[in-house]
Each structure stands twice: as structure tokens, then as C-alpha cells.
Image: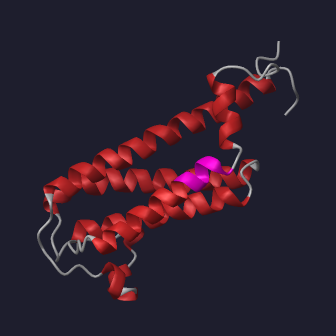
Amino acid sequence: MDYNKDNKGFVCWIYNFQRTRKPWMALFLVCIGLLVGSFFCGASDPLSMIIRSILAIILLGAIIAMIEPKSFAVKLIAYIFIFLGVIFGLSYTNESKTLSLENFSFPFGLPLNEWMPAIFLPKSAEISSSLSVVGFIGFAFIGAIFLVMILSWFVYNARSSEINSI
């Protein structure tokens, strides 16, 4: 029995939706909006700089997925970038109390503050606790949405492979 034949249900809807550019464009626009907003709000503490770099990782994943949203390999690479960004985001916002100007580092150990000081050089040592809470909730929300998407993707393909050769 082909569970996906009628193309009904939540899993089929999510699977078909993530094969379009709409969710990836929405993620792209949200990340761009948050990045632009971070420049206008004037936040210049270490956590803000790290969140900018993490948003850039998620933004890269969204751009990769928009290239060809129906391709398995392209989408898998995009999901890897998005989930790396979510994991880094949750980790850094959760440990924001220990961040200072002396001991902060960007994801993957990249010296972004040396490469692009106008964007990633922290000027203030004060870390806003509200920023860490809002950042944690935001990254958890993005992670939850994309966890549902990737699980629907795998469930749809697993149900289709029961009767179709892979």
C-alpha cells in the first residue's frame, strides 16, 4: 500500500511544502531581517556578534536550499547548515553568562572579529539577559520547525520506499 499515493495528511503536506522555495525564502527573509535589525538596534556585545555569525550560517543553509529544493543532496546540505546554526545558537545563548570580551569565540573557531571588524567586533562587555532568552527561544523555534520538516521528509520517503525501489 502506498501511503503517499493520495497525497493526503500532514506528512505529505509538509513534504510537498518543503519541496518549494517558500519555506526557504521565509527563513532567508527572517534571517536577513534579524541581521539588519541587529545593526539598527546597536547591540555590540559578544553575544550579539555571535548571534550574527550563527544567523549567517542559517542564512547560508536557506540559500543552499533555494537553489534546488527538490534535490535530496542539496536539501540535506541545507538541513545540516540550518541545524548546525540552531545547535550553535542554543548553545551560545544558553551559556551567555560566561561570555566576556576576553573569552568569546565564534562557531568553528573562525576569527570573524579580525576578518570583518565592522560587523563582528564587540565593543561592549555587557550582555543583555533578555537577548539570551529571546535568542534561545528564537533558535528553539527555528529548530522545532525544521525538525518537523526533516522528519516529514524522511517519513514520506520511507513510506514511499516500502513499495517503490530506491
Question: What secondary structure is the stretch in magenta mostly built from?
Answer: helix
| Nearer to the camera, 138 or 33 | 33
Q: Residue at x 23, y 78 (%)?
A: 122
Q: Is residue 95 above or below residue 111?
A: above
Quadrant including the C terminus? top right
Quarter of the image for residue 100 reads bottom left
Residue 95 visible in rendering: no
Quarter of the image for residue 40 reads bottom left
* Residue 22 lies in the magenta stretch: yes
Q: Position of residue 6 (x, y in %)?
A: 80, 19
Q: Is residue 90 above or below residue 29?
A: above
Residue 74 visible in rendering: yes
Q: Residue at x 64, y 61 (%)?
A: 64
Indicate left or right for 152 with 41 as reference. right
Q: How many marks?
A: 0
Quarter of the image for residue 165 reads top right
Quadrant including the N terminus? top right
